[in-house]
Image (cartoon, grey):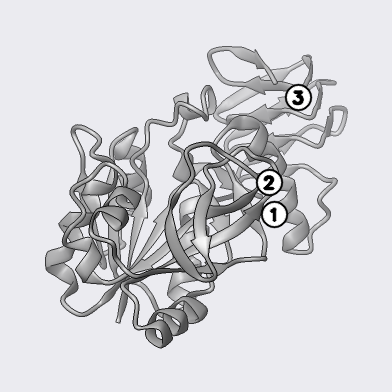
Amino acid sequence: MTKFFLLAAGLGKRAWPLSLIEPKPLFPLDGTPLIKLILDQLAQKGVDQGFINLHHKAESIAEFLKGYDSITFFHEANLSGSKILNKAAEFLEEDYLLIINGDVFLDIPLDCLIEKLDQSKSDGVLLVREDKTKMYSSLKCEQDCYKGVESYPSAGLMYAGVALLKNSIISRIYEQNFFQTLGKYNFDTRVLIYEGLWLDIGDPRSYFQSNFLYKKHVNKNHDLNSLSEQVLISPDSIVKHTIIWGNTRILNKTRISHSIITGNMTLDQLNYQHKIITGQEVYNF
C-alpha cells in the first residue's frame, strides 16, 4: 500500500508577497487551491491516507482540510526540513511513502514509480525532469541510478518534487535534506524521467505563468482570466489576463491587466497593469 506525505510547511519566502495572504498550498490554479488538486488526484489513484506537515499559516491549511479524516497532520513549531518525514516511519510498516513538494503541480505517475521500485528492487525512486534553465540543483545520475547532487546548478536532470521511498530510507532520515540521507547510507536509489506538465508555483512570476499553463492543460481558454469563487466584474470594467482570488468585486470602469488580485476586496475606478494587488498594498509585478 502507498501512503503520501505532502510537504506543506515552508515559510513561503520566494512567494512573497502572495504568501502574506495565503500559504503556497492554498494558491489557486484556475480557481482551485493547489492542495485540493493534488489530494483529488491522489484519491483518484487510490491513495487517500497520508501525512501533511504544517507551519506557515498552518491554521489556514488545517481549516481548509477539515474533514479529511485519513490525513495525519504534523504541526512544526520550528521547521525541520526533511527530518519531518521520519515521523511517518512508525505508521508505514511495509508501505511505500509517496513524498510530494507542496509547491508544484504535475500528473504524478504513481504506477510507473511503483513499477520502477519493484522491478529494480531498490530503496527508492526519484522523479526527475530535464532542466535547461540552470535554475535548479542538478542531480548526478549514471543511467537510472542516482549518485548525488551537483555542487552547482547546470543543464541536466533536476528533482521534480516527487519521490517514492521505502521505510528503509524514511526511518533513517535525520538530515535537513533527505538527499543527504541517500548519500550517507549509500541507498540504492533510482530515477524516473518525467516528461509531462510540471508547474512550479514557488514565486509570483512562476505562479502567474503556471496558472495559464494549467488552464491550457485542462483545455480551457488560457487567454481568459483565472477566477476563484465569488468574483464579480462589472460590465463597464475591463480585466485581462489576470488571476483573481475569491471574494473580489471589481466595479465602475476599473481597468486591470496581467495582474494578481489576492481576494477579499473591492476595486473601484482603478487602473493597474502588472501588479500584485492585496488588501494592504499594491506591489509591482
In terms of sequence position, does the residue under pointer 3 or pointer 2 come before the other? 2
Tell me how far mark 3 sits from mark 2, CA to CA: 24 Å
Task: State the residue at coordinates (58%, 31%).
Answer: 263
The disc at residue 211 is: 2
Task: State the residue at coordinates (82%, 45%).
Answer: 224
Estimate the x, y position of residue 122 in percent, counting from the top left: 34, 77
Amino acid type at image mark 3:
Leu
**Up/down of 236 relative to 126, above or below:** above
Q: What element carries label 3?
A: strand
- Looking at the image, can residue 31 be seen? no
Task: Give neighbour class at mark 2: few <14, some 14-19, many 20+ (Cα, 10 Å).
Answer: many
Mark 3 highlights which residue?
A: 251
Amino acid type at image mark 2:
Asn
Mark 1 highlights which residue?
A: 214
Contact (CB < 8 A) between labels 2 and 1? Answer: yes
Does residue 187 appear to the left or right of 20 in the view shown? left
Tell me how far mark 2 sits from mark 1, CA to CA: 5 Å
Task: State the residue at coordinates (46%, 53%).
Answer: 35
Return the residue nearer the eye: 283 or 108.
108
Q: Is mark 1 on a helix, strand or loop?
A: helix
Task: Give neighbour class at mark 3: few <14, some 14-19, many 20+ (Cα, 10 Å).
Answer: some
Amino acid type at image mark 1:
Tyr
- Looking at the image, can residue 273 be seen? yes
In terms of sequence position, does the residue under pointer 1 or pointer 3 come before the other? 1
Does residue 17 appear to the left or right of 4 in the view shown? right
Estimate the x, y position of residue 181 in percent, counting from the top left: 26, 53
Image quadrant holding the N terminus, namely bottom left
Count of marks overlaid on the render? 3
Q: Residue 218 falls in which quadrant of the image?
A: bottom right
Return the residue nearer the eye: 28 or 209.
209
Tell me how far mark 1 sits from mark 3, CA to CA: 28 Å
Q: Is mark 2 on a helix, strand or loop?
A: helix
